[in-house]
Image (cartoon, helix red, strand yellow):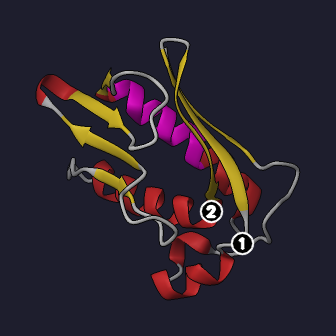
Amino acid sequence: MFTIDIDFLGQQPPRAPYSRMSLDEMYGYLIWEACLTVTYNNQILFSEEVAIIEFYWYLVNWYRRYLTGNAVQFVYSTVEHTEPILVFSPQQNQYWKIDSVWKQCDKPALIKEEILHSEVHKLLEGIMVAIEA
């Protein structure tokens, strides 16, 4: 089983049209953090506090390309770290590799594309309801 979950840690960022902002406009909201957890086969692959607006902005922009058939790698690079901290890479036969420099298990997850799509869609809907104006 593969899941991606977000916990706002009891704080709600202000509502704003984040997905339509430029990268420069979005960076004014980096103070808002949430705990992002990725699990695979009942093991935590990734669990860290992330700048939720920044993460949401990157994920929305990647997902829009993905929905148009452009299956490019998702790379969450934050201004707070030198290396990308979360990566979704397309593989053969409609699988995706989910990896992190901070992974908490031995190897990355390899999941079917429809499972990744479902989890990302669910995550984006949840975040959007909470923060988008």
- Residue drawn at x 78%, y 66% as measured from the top left: 13
- Residue drawn at x 34%, y 55% as measured from the top left: 75
Determine the main secondary structure of the stretch shown in magenta: helix
- Residue drawn at x 88%, y 50% as measured from the top left: 10
Q: Quadrant of the C terminus?
A: bottom right
Q: Indicate whether 15 appears above or below 128.
A: below
User: Is disc 2 placed on a helix, strand or loop?
Assistant: strand
Q: Quadrant of residue 106?
A: top left
Residue 114, percent from left and from top: 35, 26
User: Is disc 1 placed on a helix, strand or loop?
Assistant: loop
Residue 94, percent from left and from top: 19, 27
Q: What label does residue 51 carry, if any?
A: 2
Q: How crowded is the residue under tag 2: few (<14 C-alpha within 10 Å), some, or many (20+)? A: many
Decide which of 124, 98 is in the foreground and name it: 98
Residue on which the image places disc 1: 31
Decide which of 106, 122 is in the foreground and name it: 106
Say whether disc 1 or disc 2 marks the residue closer to the N-terminus: 1
Q: Is residue 107 magenta?
A: no
Decide which of 37, 90 is in the foreground and name it: 37
Tell me if 95 is positioned left or right of 92 in this view: right
| Residues rendered magenta in the picture | 114-124
Q: Amino acid at mark 2?
A: Ala
